[in-house]
Image: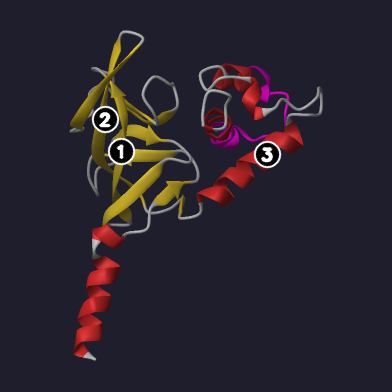
Amino acid sequence: MKHYAIFAALFCCNPIFATPLYVTEVKTLYQDSTNTKIIGKLLPTTKVEVLKTQNNRVLLSIEGYQEENKPAIYYIAGKRILSAGFDSKANITFKKGEKETIDGKNYYKVKAEFWSENNALDPDLKKIYTQAKNLFEQNCSMCHGLHNTKEFSANQWPSMFKSMAGRTGIEKKDYQLVIEYLQKHAKDMQ
């Protein structure tokens, strides 16, 4: 019985076995577990790992790509699919990995850690995409035929959506969720 308890404790608490979580709405980022100064935003559908919980906040870790000297983390190199954006004065340490050059711009595989509220995280990415898809399909076909997600590139979708979003029933708080869904299902994404 004692061996089972030790195994269970190691299995449940070891980050190697941590279930990835996905952000369900735009989340505010902080430098530490008590600071109220906002240092950035974390966007929906971004994959995160919870490293620690403290003061109703969670220390999150994310991976992605950073364009050289830009205070942002992108989903993939060369596309404007934002995972997290930071205040240029935020004291974020980006652990840099391999470099990739696309269209003359250098992107680095990065990992970063920061704090956020302990909410709006879900292990079911498919459920989050279904919510975004439903918002898109139910609201973006009232004035015209529904655009196929593959009709535009990942970099085109944000401006296409924003130009028409105000005419839909989609709440502003859900705009970024729909944009992330459209970008990650665009014609130039696999």
Q: Compare residues 187 and 82 and report the one nearer the observer.
A: 187
Label 3 secondary element? helix
The disc, 1 or 3, on the residue closer to the chain's N-terminal end is 1
- Residue under pointer 2: 109
Between 117 and 131, the one nearer to me in the picture: 131
Q: CA distance from mark 1 to mark 3?
A: 27 Å
- Residue 36: where, in percent of width, then height? 29, 41
Please report whichever mark, 3 or 2, sits nearer to the chain's N-terminal start.
2
Q: How far separated are the C-alphas under marks 2 and 1? A: 7 Å
46 left or right of 108? Answer: right
Question: SS at mark 2?
Answer: strand
Q: Which amino acid type is shown beneath numbered disc 1?
A: Glu
Residue that carries the numbered disc 3 in the rendered image:
135
Residue under the image location 34 percent in, 32 percent down: 40
Q: Residue at x 24, y 48 (%)?
A: 34
- Report the side of 183 relative to 63 (left or right): right
Numbered mark located on residue 124 in the image: none
**Secondary structure predominantly adopted by residues drawn in magenta:** helix
Give amino acid for label 3. Leu
Label 2 neighbour load within 10 Å: few <14, some 14-19, many 20+: many
Residue 80 in the image: x percent, y percent? 44, 21
Q: Is residue 152 above or below residue 123?
A: above
Tags 2 and 1 in contact by the CB under 8 Å rule?
yes
Q: Quadrant of residue 136?
A: top right
Q: Which residue is mark 1?
A: 63
Q: Is residue 136 above or below residue 58?
A: above
Say whether residue 71 is visible: no
Residue 97 position within the rendered picture, expressed as x and y whole percent measured from the top left:
20, 31
Kind of residue at disc 2: Lys
Position in image of residue 23 (x %, y %)? 45, 45
Residue range of the region highlighted in magenta in the rendering: 163-178
